[in-house]
Image: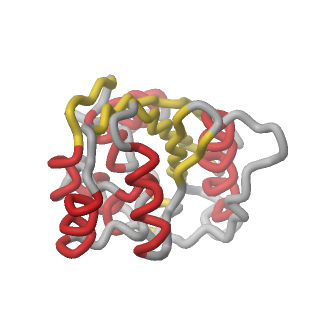
Amino acid sequence: MRRLVLASTSVFRRELLSRLQLPFETAAPDVDETPLPGEAPALTAERLALAKAQAVAGRFPDALIIGSDQVAFHGEQRFGKPGTRENASRQLRAMSGKTVIFHTGLCLLNAATGRSHLRGIPTEVHFRELSDAEISRYLDKEDALGCAGSAKSEGLGISLMEAMRGDDPNALVGLPLIALCQMLRAEGVELP
């Protein structure tokens, strides 16, 4: 089997990819994640997924490289990784009672041929009305400072949500496995 590289240091993406039971390596991409002026959130996620895969291609010239990025947004407002508890509280208050789109960009780059597969997978998440006390209790119990939108659906963050709609439940965590399997098969990787 061709070498497989996940261009990410995310423990969540690593855990998701391990479900496919394929051997893989990880590599940290050095990519500026700042949106371009006027760039739509969905395009940001897809551009960054491709950029992350390309950023490590030089180190793995014979590999299939997986890049992924996620942007959460409601209207014109974007919700990135909060970094601080104050920012997380602010994000959760802003998302309270609203439907937020978590757009996950996915790229599979064949470094040997230069061929890339690129897709965007949106997931709609409707947050229930959240009180300040609920937000505070959530942030006391779960470290969500490193995830877009400040709520981990794979953990306690699910309690903040009313409904979800999307084609792949893994996309919300950061690596859409259904689309990735399609891309891997297109590159000749055998999966059950």
Left or right: residue 190 versus residue 87 is left
> Vertically, is 64 above or below 42?
below
Q: Is residue 158 left or right of residue 105?
A: left
Q: Residue at x 41, y 61 (%)?
A: 147
Image quadrant for the C terminus?
top left
User: Which residue is most to the right?
Assistant: 37
Relative image position of residue 115 (x, y in whole percent): 66, 36
- In the image, residue 143 lies at what x, y percent? 29, 73
* Percent of width and height locating residue 44: 67, 42
Residue drawn at 84 percent across, 45 percent down: 37
**As drawn, is 184 to the left or to the right of 140?**
right
- Give the color scheme: rainbow, by chain, secondary structure or one colour: secondary structure
Between 48 and 151, the one lying in front of the other is: 151
91 left or right of 46?
left
**Front one among 63 and 16:** 16
- In the image, 178 versus 192, the foreground residue is 178
Please name the residue shown 38% across and 59% down the image: 150
Image location (x, y in percent) of residue 61: 65, 60
Point 54% across, 56% down: residue: 80
The answer to whether residue 183 is above or below residue 47 is above
Report how many numbered discs are placed on residues in the image. 0
Asked whether the viewer can see residue 88, the reply is: yes
Task: Specify whether residue 64 is in view.
Answer: no
